[in-house]
Image (cartoon, coloured by chain):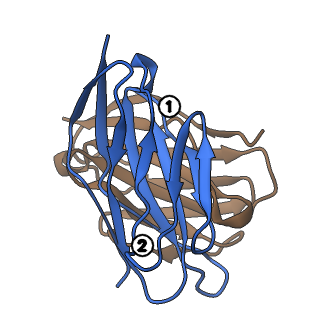
Amino acid sequence: GDSVTQMEGPVTLSEEAFLTINCTYTATGYPSLFWYVQYPGEGLQLLLKATKADDKGSNKGFEATYRKETTSFHLEKGSVQVSDSAVYFCALALGSGGSYIPTFGRGTSLIVHP
Amino acid sequence: DVKVTQSSRYLVKRTGEKVFLECVQDMDHENMFWYRQDPGLGLRLIYFSYDVKMKEKGDIPEGYSVSREKKERFSLILESASTNQTSMYLCAIQGGQETQYFGPGTRLLVL
């Protein structure tokens, strides 16, 4: 079945450091790929997405490129802030009768120190 | 903006109680979902619904049921709560281009 694997956390960084959170997937077909973020005490919210190979999703300084050849969708940010501390989830969605049931990774906690 | 509300942020219940968790959306979306979130396990799908009175089992439906009598409301029911159902419960709706919109979550403690 479909699956998403992302690096285990927590990832601990100092403010202004470079961030990479790795995400790879397996899917039968051509999924759309997503990164969601969950701030403390809240539900998940969409951070960025890409719907086809070589697309780059970007938002709030975060970027991820849909790499079909390596089945990856790594999240990057050039300079993290304390306010980026959250849990990040990689996900894929593959239409099945129009339902697009998503598959989520287990989440990676990011802690940014001042 | 899409708004998904959940009836409670925190709940404390006793083993054996019947528990209702409600989710309401303010848009006209057909697809609604219930997940539970546990440390180290990520999100696991309990049930989802395509339309009123329609429901489908997710990955972990045991011990749960759902109700969707109106399009905007999707309820998760724990028929007889057990301690292993202590968790964070998240409701979501499916918007355009497969994006999910989540409620703030209900943290349930079963004693």
| Residue at x 56%, y 35% (from the top left corner) | A61
**What is the drawing colour of chain B?**
brown
| Residue at x 48%, y 54% (from the top left corner) | B76
Q: Is residue A83 above or below residue B105?
A: above
Specify whether disc 2 shares its chain with disc 1: yes
Residue B58's mark? 2
Mark 1 lies on residue = B8
Instruction: Name the outermost residue toward the top.
Output: A114
Amino acid residing under circle 2:
Gly
Residue A114: x, y in percent?
32, 10
Q: Report the side of A99 relative to B35 (left or right).
A: right
Res. B59 image quadrant = bottom left
Q: Which chain is blue?
A: A
Res. B64 image quadrant = bottom left
Q: Sequence-wise, which precedes: disc 2 or disc 1?
A: 1
Mark 1 falls within which chain? B
